[in-house]
Amino acid sequence: MPESEKNNTVDDAQLQFTPSGQLKHLLTIRGLAREQIVELLDRSQEFVIAEGEAVVRSTALRGRTVANLFFEPSTRTRASFDLSAKRLGADVLNLDVNTSSRKKGESILDMIYTLQAMQVDVFVVRDAEAGVPAHIARHVSNFVSVLNAGESHVSHPTQALLDLLTIRQRKGKIENLHVAIVGDIAHSRVARSVSEALATMGVGSLRLVSPKALAPDIHAFPEDAIVTEDLDEGIAGADVVMALRIQRERIGSLDGVPGVDEYFSAYGVSHKRMQLAAPDAIVMHPGPMNRGIEIESSLADSPCSVIRDQVRNGVAVRMAVLSTVVKSLEDLHK
Ligand code: CP
């Protein structure tokens, strides 16, 4: 892959839109205007169902094929894209990448061209390497969409949207809220994407809390984000507290990262720590969680936790994104 394609550039943001400005690929939050984010959240809300209710079904993707290509492990994202596409009436191909011909040396693009020849309309891609979703988007036919389902440490746009939807449901707004993101900011694609989305929505303050060894590259975050190693300072008065897992799979050496007990003591989001936050603060976690390390286990199951709402909203957001991009493909044919 060319070096120039390995990062989310402004070009990646522009690549997402048709000439008339409709969302055709979702590669990054960057480039999405506030109004476009609000529209996606409003559309998502239409697909939200209460626990125990029958699921919302539609025929928006009837005759369409969605291929899920997950080159990294996933539970939530993969399952929710699968269910979303099916609830919209699509055929879904969940390719087992471990037994695919990529293992025999086939390039990612040859794999995409092969599946495109079988009339796949939407590729949902998760990859450990930065730049892969945009690389695919640059090479697919004009009538095919690519959705980023998690790209290295760089970007996870549908996760950011489901986080915003969850915050909006609980708080009634996103504007002017104080949000603390706590943990391994350095290696977190969730932290990057949700920070971009929160900044676009006009959040009151964004606090990034981590030990020095897991501190963010500040150039990848909104310039007014507050970066601190002090959890008490970061969490004080926060309306939203998001705990993050240590992304061991992306860390070469754990040198400088505190051991489990020390980490929980300094950076674990706990009932005691939450007493410093706003009285009605909510606790979030994108999952998968390591209970007792970045979050106190009983806090994750407590009334202030919206972690299961995040999962439920993941299906609604992916239904909204799939129906939006497929509508854009249809309009390209007109
Ligand atoms: N939040 C998230 O991306 O979870 P999965 O890795 O299980 O998809």
Image: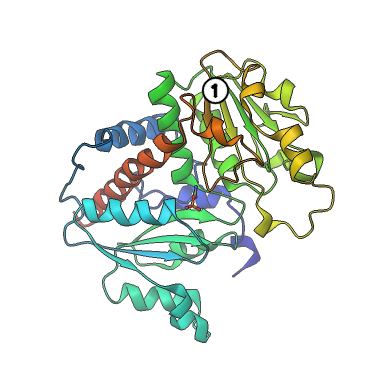
Horizontal relation, residue 237 to residue 36: left or right = right
Percent across and percent down for residue 293 are 67, 42
Query: Residue shown at 79%/58% (left/top)?
Result: 253
- Evaluate whether residue 234 shows in this view: yes
Q: Residue furthest front?
A: 298
Colour scheme of this structure image?
Answer: rainbow
Quadrant containing the C terminus is bottom left
Indicate the secondary structure of the residue bearing disc 1.
loop
- Evaluate whether residue 32 shows in this view: no
Query: Residue shown at 38%/71% (left/top)?
Result: 95
Horizontal relation, residue 324 to residue 248: left or right = left
In terms of image quadrants, where is residue 330?
Answer: bottom left
For the residue pair 60 and 171, the one nearer the viewer reads as 171
Percent across and percent down for residue 287 are 52, 45
Q: Residues within 10 Å of mark 1 (few under 14, many from 20)?
A: some
Q: Which residue is mark 1?
A: 203
For the residue pair 266 and 55, the one nearer the viewer reads as 266
Query: Residue shown at 49%/80% (left/top)?
Result: 102
For the residue pair 110 and 315, the one nearer the viewer reads as 315
Horizontal relation, residue 49 to residue 297: left or right = left
Quadrant containing the N terminus is bottom right
Residue 26, placed above or below residue 197: below
Residue 333, placed above or below residue 155: below
Percent across and percent down for residue 278 are 58, 14
Inspect the image, locate mark 1, and give the three-letter code of the amino acid beneath it.
Answer: Val
